[in-house]
Image (tube, rainbow, N blue to C red):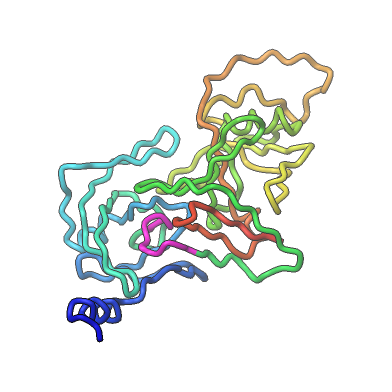
Amino acid sequence: MLKPLAALALLAAAAAPTPVDERLVDGDAIVAMTVQGVSLRVRISPGAPAMPVFTDTAAGRARLKGGPFGARFVVGPVKLPARTAVADLTLGPVAFKRRVAWTERPFAEGVDGVIGPGGVPEQVVRFVLGPSRPGERTLTIPYDDSRWGVGTAQMTLGGVRTVVRFDPLAPRTVATAAAAVALAAAHRGTVSGDPAPLPIAFGVERPVRTLTLADPLALGPLTIASLAVRVADGGAANTLREADADPDEVQVVGKGKPGRSSLLIGHDQLRHCSALVFDKAAKQIRLTCG
């Protein structure tokens, strides 16, 4: 016979809700999130910060009051101030508290806010990118889970430690100048085209050129032969060889200031993939592509 305390413990365990371990994100990735009792349309995006970011209008609807701690988002030279507060959130069946931010400029159009996989309560977040393909392979890399920022991986690319991010909503794969210089040196890369604006976040566009790799970069199941370069961000790109330069010509270039080596894998590559999984418990990112 069970003792009273043991029986109560078993009853409490039986009554406890089953933990929600995995969240499946597909389609447009827009979900209903309750913020301070107000329902908002929020997109779960691997390219978004773990800290939920709302628009000023949405924050007003939820009657959020800014506390003493502010935040600032930086996109190239553009610095965007944000207000923050700790809010009561509900996502699906799970209620939780989280510090949230809101800005005058929306992070993304058409939604009240965004949240990254690091901010949702589930331990595993699986983004469905497309149907399964024959001969698929999975790339498994360590997950740098950020409490506030975008979830990233750290990889050595072109001999340089590089922050790697994934965003299926970003139209192009894009590298900062420092990453591009390292990749060009390791993979016989050249740049071409005039600088053209590319949307990054918060409606901010940054100038990019095209980097072509004569020896494509193999990233697990992905093969990257062409990508965009943020020529004015994350270092100096003036050491990159022009595509129309004479290979025997001696080019004199200035030394660029070292910057952060960062690579964003966008839709042009992720369209070949079926799943992107952020496993916070295992501290892994798993990308499956065919």
* The N terminus: image quadrant: bottom left
The location of residue 275, given as percent across then percent down, is 59, 63
Is residue 204 or residue 98 the one in the foreground? 98
Left or right: 63 as drawn, with respect to 285? left
**In percent of the image, x 34 and y 49: which residue is there?**
105
Q: Is residue 124 left or right of residue 265?
A: left
- The image quarter in which residue 95 lies: bottom left
In the displayed structure, would residue 45 be above or below residue 13? above
Report the number of numbered marks. 0
Magenta stretch holds residue 117: yes
| Extent of the magenta region | 114-125
**Residue closest to the far right:** 248
| Residue 156 rendering spot, x and y as whole percentages | 61, 36
Question: Left or right of 24: which side holds 41?
Answer: left
Image quadrant in which the C terminus is located: bottom right
Q: Kindly give the residue lying farthest to the front in the view shown.
A: 1
Q: Which quadrant of the view contains residue 190?
A: top right
Q: Is residue 17 magenta?
A: no
Foreground residue among 246 and 151: 151
Name above or below for residue 255 compared with residue 86.
above
Q: Position of residue 177 (x, y in %)?
A: 57, 31
Q: Residue at x 23, y 49 (%)?
A: 84
Which residue is painted at 60% across and 35% down in the image? 195
Q: Where 247 sits versus 133, above or below?
A: above
Image position, residue 4 (x, y; %): 17, 81
Question: Going by the picture, which residue comes out furthest to the bottom?
Answer: 1
The answer to whether 123 appears left or right of 193 in the picture is left
